[in-house]
Amino acid sequence: MKLLHLDSSILADNSVTRELSAVVADTLRQRHANVETSYRDLAANPIAHLSGEIVGARFAPSPTGPRPSAAKPRSASS
């Protein structure tokens, strides 16, 4: 069994949800010997966000024409 344990509260050790999630994760590990846990603290190690430049590049017109994913979807009646 795989368990992804995420903490995201900026309250660190004063966080009730961190305490609760730790109890749940510990209980699962005690009851199931095959638990593989991946832990991430998103407050201590935040995920890098996309920059405006990266997002803008996704929506910029292509010099070679429209991208296949940008094609207009067909209606149900077509």
Image: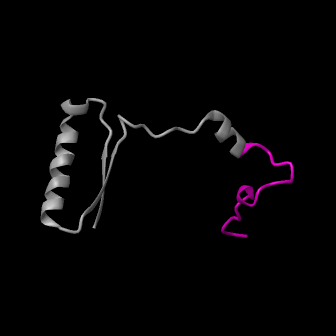
| Image-based side of 49 in relation to 59, left or right | left
Quick one: 13 or 15, which is closer to the camera? Answer: 13
> 77 above or below 58?
below
> 16 above or below 71?
above
| Image-based side of 19 in relation to 48, left or right | left
Quick one: 69 or 1, which is closer to the camera? Answer: 1
Q: Residue at x 69, y 46 (%)?
A: 58
Quadrant for the C terminus in the image: bottom right
Spot occupied by residue 39 in the image (x, y as percentages of width and height): 31, 49
Write the start and end of the magenta stretch as one range. 59-78
Spot occupied by residue 56 in the image (x, y as percentages of width and height): 69, 39
> 68 above or below 51?
below
Q: Residue at x 75, y 61 (%)?
A: 68
Q: Quadrant of residue 66?
A: bottom right
Q: Quadrant of residue 42?
A: top left
Spot occupied by residue 31 in the image (x, y as percentages of width and height): 13, 65
Quick one: 52 or 73, which is closer to the camera? Answer: 52
Q: Residue at x 70, y 61 (%)?
A: 73
| Image-based side of 28 in relation to 2, left or right | left
